[in-house]
Amino acid sequence: MKNRYPLPERRWFLGLAIVGLIGAVLFIATAITTSDRRFLCPLAAGIRARARAYEDYNPSPIQLRAILHYATSRVIPQQSVSEIKISFDVLKSFGRPCNFLVFGLGHDSLMWASLNPGGNTLFLEEDPKWVQAVLKDAPGLRAHTVRYRTHLREAHKLISSYRSEPMCSPTKAFLRGNQACRLALENLPDEVYETEWDLIMIDAPKGYYAEAPGRMAAVFSAAVMARNRKGSGVTHVFLHDVDRKVEKVYAEEFLCKNNLVKSVGRLWHFQIPPSFNDTNAVRFC
């Protein structure tokens, strides 16, 4: 997620692509604003719409900061342009500001926040020092530190034994205060539990050495949030690094292959419906 060591050969291309995506968001937002205005004369409508577009052009501070950052920075996001575009297309499809929860804080965080103008974009990160470092350069971002109870070396044991714990079951699982289920993120800020998230991006915590937290709890908790959704519609869950065994196994166990709608590179996109009537389920999938 943090990607402290960029690849020079793709740096300039990805930076320009991100600036282009942010510019597209600004254009779409302006187009939506002007499209609702009706005029009797089509020619006059076109002239007035263009004039109104210039008047309505009002990028947010975080979008301007993101454009400046990615246009001048040597550091690029970890995801490829094609992977980023999956989330961008979903955000664009809503036609409104979204609730966007991101596991991980890094060099792509300004991008995610700027692609959701006016929305609620919240980042969860396990490293307090890294949070301070990122927010020092991008104070407009919103982030919380998360304490994980898992280690990557426990991944096999946890997925083999979670069914024996009733509080991990798909019909009883919850998050806030759920200390019985080690896969549940039980100590998050209240805002996380009380918000119905339209999109959840899982690109953290670290999961490439034995003592790292691994993404087991993040995947499980995202599944619980999506299944416990009270409102209408699905929750879009994006999981990165699915080329790694743990991410893939946990995705198939909790996010479910039948909910997988798109796969590009190392990113899987799931659409998870609420489980209103799924009261007798013994497995998540």
Image: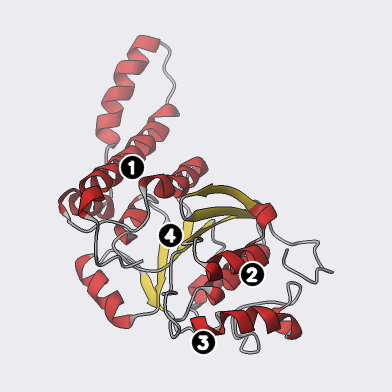
Circles 4 and 3: CB distance less than 8 Å? no
User: First in sequence: mark 1 or mark 2?
Assistant: 1
Task: Describe the colour scheme in one phrase.
Answer: secondary structure
Secondary structure at numbered mark 2: helix
Kindly identify which residue carries mark 2.
Answer: 224
Does dot 4 land on a helix, a strand or a loop?
Answer: strand
- Amino acid type, callout 2: Val
51 vs 9, nearest the viewer: 9
Q: Earlier in the sequence, mark 2 or mark 3?
A: 3
Q: In this picture, is 180 found above or below 31?
A: below
Q: Position of residue 236 (x, y in %)?
A: 56, 54
- Can residue 56 be seen here? The reply is yes
In the rendered image of this protein, does residue 49 appear above or below residue 5?
above
Q: Is residue 155 left or right of residue 58?
A: right
In front: mark 2 or mark 4? 2
Query: In the image, which is nearer the foreground, mark 1 or mark 4?
Result: 1
Which residue sits furthest left? 72
Label 4 sits on what residue type?
Asn
In front: label 4 or label 3: 3
Q: Earlier in the sequence, mark 4 or mark 3?
A: 4
Residue 120 numbered mark, or none: 4
Residue wearing tag 1? 21
